[in-house]
Amino acid sequence: MSATPLALEIVDLRVEYPMADGTAFVAVDGVSVSIAPGEIHALVGESGAGKTTVGNAVMGLLEAPGRVTGGAMRIAGVVVDPATGRAPGIEPGRDIGAIFQDPMTSLNPLFTVESQITETLRHHLGMDRRQSSAKALDLLRAVGIPEPERRLRAYPHQLSGGQRQRVVIAAALSCNPRLLVADEPTTALDVSIQSQILKLLRGLADDRGLGILLVTHNMGVVAEIADRVTIMHRGVAVESGPVVEVLDAPRHDYARSLIGAVPRIDVTLPRFAVPGEEAEAAEGARAELRRRAGEQTGAAEGELLRVEDLVVDYRGRGGSFRAVDGVGFSVRAGEVFGLVGESGCGKTTIANAIAGLVKPTAGRVLHRGRPIAAAGTRRPLQMIFQDPYSSLNARMRVGATLVEPILFYRLAASAREAAEDAALLLEAVGLERTAVERYPHAFSGGQRQRISIARALSARPSLLICDEPTSSLDVSIQAQILNLLKDLRDATGLTLLLISHDLAVIRQMCDRVAVMKAGRIVEEAPTETLFGAPTHAYTRELLSLVPSPRPKRRTA
Amino acid sequence: MLAVTAVAFLMFRYVGDPVRAMAREDSSVEERQELARALGLDQPVAVQYGKFVARVVALDFGISYRNHRPVAALIGERLPATLEIVFVATVLALAFGVPLGVLCALRPDGLAARAVQAVSLIGISTPTFVVGIALILVFAVTLKVLPSFGRGEVVTLGWWTTGFLTPSGIASLVLPSVTLCLFQMTLIMRLVRSEMIDVLSTDYIRFARARGLPRRYIHFKLALRNALMPVITVTGLQIGSLVAFAIVTETVFQWPGMGLLFIQAIYFVDIPVMAAYLLFVGFLFVFLNTVVDVLYALVDPRLRVRS
Amino acid sequence: MRVPGSVIVAGIVATLMILAAIVAPAIAPYDPTDMATYNLIDSELPPVWTGEGDARFPLGTDNQGRDLLSAIIYGARVSVGIGGAAVLLAATIGVSLGLLAGYFGGWIDAVVMRAGDIIMSFPTILLALLVSGLARALMPDGGSVGWTPFILIGAIAIHDWVQYARTVRAAAMVEGAKDYVKAARVIGLPGRRIMLHHILPNVMSPVLVIATINLAGAVLTEATLSFLGVGMPPNYPSLGTLIRIGNEFVFSGIWWIALFPAITLVILVLAVNMVGDHLRDRFNPKLRGRS
């Protein structure tokens, strides 16, 4: 079977970025990957692992100062010249295709789908207008776009995200390359479209013998379609092998903790198996928070929050849009209640309405039986947000950020006492007391999310609304933050409303779950019931689409 | 546009006293009242405004206080001169600004790009009138190759007078339009440069590179088209500013255009001329805006479908 | 980020020139606003290095026998003073309105932006000419000279505030949609506190950039108005007025009256522009990290 050469063979690749001070940052250090025709090889890792850099090196698209300083690459059996990044006779675009993360920005808005596919054909294969046009039509059919004749003359903005990614794939495959580099090809897409695109890629590999280098952070995607996987960490390939072996029985420490951090959808675990260095100070700080919470509210029993017939309309230029359409649910004190659904289903709008950021068109939100309306009744409902980088005021010290709500609600007798409380909160979320002195830019994404949690807690809330709290974090950081939220709930009796698009996160965190679609709740049930025996068709569909991090189908 | 007519009307009505400006020094109170009635100044403000708008629509801007001629006729005489230098300046600005901007974007560290950047910075820092005086000093006073004032011989085509058809007319056009175009050219160059740099870092250009398309094709066929979109807007709207900047240029070169007319109107507080000029610029702005919108809809598919 | 040498030089030049303008009375050899110091016998003397000049007047004299060096230093003082005041006025108005429009939206936003659109549809020069022309018309006797600087400041600021308002509005809308502002709202902080304490500090960097670039623009606009004869009068000249005076003598070969003020003006504006350009590139995340 050695008649056809490997689609890609990388041996000991090293990529460096020279720094201003004369040293070099090693982005990729001794990575080896080989891909046979028809094989999908996944390169996984967290941000900064160097996985995208490997993809760019293969494409000859390294950003300016970066360069290959060691190792060898062969594309379809041809050695790549390390100086030029090119292999003689191998044309990027003709013999290697590439697709990127965001289909919304990968196509030029000023040109038709047809022109963007045919320009590649005309340049590489010298086809004339008619030939290339016919070929473009074939390609659109091959990637499964409905009404391909009409789409050919469409502009990118007239297509949906999934259709655009199909066009991108069609353009990348137009000259029948032997290798496709796919960099996070489904990250910007909803699960239902993700699953279609993944099926398409798998099919292309199987039918055309295309080798695919799949760069992703998503273990579920890896388990779903890849044959082999390489786990990268800080530029180094820590473990490599067939997907089944690596995912089921990782040998390397980092690989084990990375895979342990991935929320599982098939079984509920008490905690994420990630190394968490919890300081003893955190225990003490949390106990103190619990004592205060008890003083303040007495026993936390029964219904804490009730949402009745909530309707939210957004008024836009072309009339109004109903984001939330008659939603009702209640949250009991001390539980974690989950709201789950695809993007645009209205879950974030509900969170905003409860937090008072959006005025409901109709319906009521009750906290302990009292409607939430005027300022002053807001304090018990606090919120944390998705993006840790925008959720802190860059011009305020962490201490000032935490002290502001404490003083505003007169929760401390003096500024000194407030500062002491701020330090206590930081300990409770697992940070050093000295963090009060610093500005947000000194902290990583995960640390900033901890600070956001501390700020929310500083108003002494009874309910913490968490809107996609970990969606922009790496998976191991996500596991730590989710563990922290669980610990805070257990230690202080806090109630959580968790909003997420990620069913696996919901499964690991929540006691009860409501599934949303198009502004309505379609199913509400205790977590185990919902995941064990979903009753609504939409819930079943969603569950079936989620790629499970347990490899199931391929035996390489 | 309505706002502009309102401002022009208020100016016309309340600024300065037309009766005092038009009547003879020794006229009696009765004569003055008679004149006020004749001008319609005794009627309610709303009626006066209505009549004002009606007159404007009929291109009747009243009579200049200073030289007692209809303002519309004065503007009609001066319009071609201004529009001709504005036109030449715009063409020059585009012809040099776009290629220089592209050059700077493609080779931002190259010697040529740095030189162009430095010159452009000096360009936006030098006031139009200084440029004009410098050009006069060099080409008219020292070298004596180009005329420093006036339009030269003009040919009359209907109501339009043009300097394009005579050698002296063309020679006269050179210095004023070069002076006028410099600022605009710098602006276009800088805009093209920054747009081009932005476009070159977008995903769709990366994707085009990943498909192995040739560099020239990517730069000139694809990226330039994206980068030129905002240039349409800015060039269009800048034509309005050029007309205004022509005030300065026309003063330096004694160019008999509308700017000169306007600046003289200001010296002599000739309200009807000022009001009419204001109306003209307002109208020009609305007109250019519409043209830009239409052009945009023609070249940007995203707008084409919506409209 | 490294600051290029040229920008450092520009910064030093700009600072020195502005300082010199501020302390003009202390460093200028004569007081050009004091008519008693000039003598028609000394008029139109060329610069001293031409050999025909007079050591008392290093850059020569103007048509009234006024020392050109002193006139330029005082002229720069007038130009910088009017430009600076116009920037301050425009920035204050623009930032306040922009913040209100951006944070509250609704009718405030609509009114402010509409007004801005109308004003921006008139080029700076035209609007400034109109304002100063109208001010002269409204004031009896063509407006007294003492008012001229204030008319000029107003005439420039009436156009320039829009840029601040638009920028601050856009920035305030971006910041207002960010999670830290949402968090402040969820905490229940009042709108005024959120605006001043949270949003304002985060929108100030672009304001600084615009202010620097606008200072250059305002100095140019003032110079242009004075050149056109609707700005500062000859007995209290700005750089633009001096160039206007000099322009009348260019044809007769008396080039220095126009040339030296023009060079001063260009160097001043160029230095400020270079600093502004650098600041803009620095605060523009799109261009950051690129050359």
Image (cartoon, helix red, strand yellow):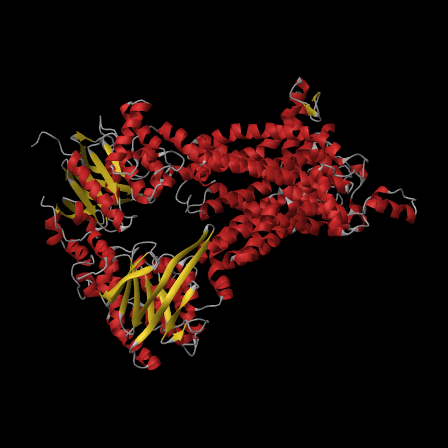
Q: Where is residue B184 shown, x and y percent of the image?
A: 56, 34
Judged from this view, the residue extending furthest toward the left is: A1
Q: Is residue A284 visible?
A: yes
How many marks are shown on the rendered structure? 0
Question: As drawn, is A236 to the left or to the right of C185?
Answer: left
Q: Quadrant of residue A522?
A: bottom left
Question: As drawn, is A3 to the left or to the right of A158?
Answer: left
Q: Where is residue C179 shown, x and y percent of the image?
A: 39, 59
Q: Is residue A28 visible?
A: no
> Along the line of sight, which residue is nearer the eye, C35 or A210?
A210
> Along the line of sight, which residue is nearer the eye, A464 or A79?
A464
Residue under the image location 42 percent in, 63 percent down: A357
Q: Looking at the picture, does residue A212 appear above or below residue A510?
A: above
Residue under the image location 91 percent in, 48 percent down: B30
Q: Quadrant of residue A81?
A: top left
Q: Quadrant of residue A326?
A: bottom left
Q: Where is residue C201 shown, x and y percent of the image?
A: 48, 59
Question: As drawn, is C265 to the left or to the right of A232?
Answer: right
Q: Quadrant of the C terminus of chain A?
A: top left
Question: As drawn, is A554 to the left or to the right of A146?
Answer: left
> Along the line of sight, which residue is nearer the eye, B120 or A258?
A258
Q: Where is residue A293 shown, x and y percent of the image?
A: 32, 78
> Along the line of sight, which residue is nearer the eye, A350 or C174?
A350
Q: Quadrant of the N terminus of chain A?
A: top left
